[in-house]
Image (cartoon, rainbow, N blue to C red):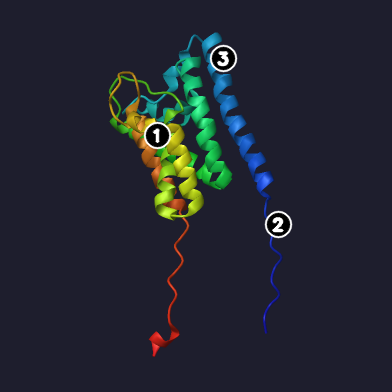
């Protein structure tokens, strides 16, 4: 005798998920721009002090704050478009993937900068998250090996393939550590969120 199945909650439509994703991006970017305007116009850029200061106890708070702080509006604008495009590509697949990738990248990138960043420096900006999104999109295609993830990886690389040079210490004043560990954080998220491979079909006669 079988028990009746419990009713399953209705799944969110793709349109509803995309709407929630657009709202998430708008809130995150809106917060960054609001803070940048307040910091620049009213606080003489003093909030930058709350970024990541490597190997200082108080600098640990910067792991949470740094992505929302920028040196100036040009710095923020440079991060806004790739954050929107790459984050949007992840949301097209799954809003859950976006938030998990953001959270893992925030921690991995922030801790990497705190541990290995230059002494007496302050690191701010959302570029670590941008590199995390980029790393996720490229790595997901390696772990899932499905056509959709491959298409997203190709689009991401076509649009922002030159980002890969940002993980190297080629330019003064650029937090290459944040870029490198952000990319690693995105790859970790891709591995954790990868769809498990289907088990190979077995011949029942093999048990005899």
Figure quadrant of residue 17: top right
Q: Which residue is mark 1?
A: 161
Helix, strand or loop at label 3? It is helix
Residue 35 appears in the figure: yes
Q: Is residue 20 shown above or below 178? A: below
Residue 75, image x, y percentages: 46, 19
Distance in Å between CA atoms under marks 2 and 1: 39 Å
- Write the residue at 35% across / 33% down: 164
Q: Which mark is residue 38?
A: 3
Residue 29 coordinates in the image, percent (x, y)? 57, 27
- Residue 10's disc is 2
7 displayed left or right of 61: right
Q: CA distance from mark 1 to mark 3?
A: 33 Å
What residue occupies the far bottom of the structure in this picture? 208
Q: Quadrant of the C terminus?
A: bottom left
What's the residue at 30%, 18% (across, down)? 172
Depth order, front residue of 138/4: 138
First in residue order: circle 2 vs circle 1:
2
* Residue located 29% across and 30% down the image: 168
Q: In the figure, is residue 195 to the left or right of 30?
A: left
Asked whether residue 103 appears in the rendered view, the answer is no
Q: Position of residue 40 (x, y in %)?
A: 52, 11
């Amino acid at each position: 005798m079988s028990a009746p199945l419990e009713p399953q909650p209705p799944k969110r439509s793709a349109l509803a998920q995309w709407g929630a994703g657009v709202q998430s991006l708008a809130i995150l970017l809106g917060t960054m721009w609001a803070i940048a305007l307040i910091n620049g116009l009213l606080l003489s850029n003093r909030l930058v002090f709350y970024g990541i200061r490597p190997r200082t106890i108080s600098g640990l708070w910067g792991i949470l704050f740094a992505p929302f702080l920028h040196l100036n509006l040009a710095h923020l604008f440079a991060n806004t478009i790739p954050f929107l495009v790459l984050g949007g590509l992840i949301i097209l697949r799954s809003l859950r993937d976006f938030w998990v990738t953001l959270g893992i990248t925030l921690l991995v990138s922030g801790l990497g900068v705190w541990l290995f960043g230059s002494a007496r420096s302050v690191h701010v900006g959302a570029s670590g998250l941008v590199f995390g999104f980029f790393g996720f999109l490229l790595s997901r295609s390696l772990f899932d090996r499905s056509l959709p993830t491959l298409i997203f990886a190709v689009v991401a690389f076509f649009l922002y393939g030159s980002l890969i040079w940002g993980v190297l210490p080629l330019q003064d004043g650029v937090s290459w550590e944040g870029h490198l560990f952000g990319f690693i954080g995105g790859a970790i998220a891709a591995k954790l969120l990868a769809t498990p491979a289907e088990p190979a079909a077995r011949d029942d006669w093999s048990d005899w």
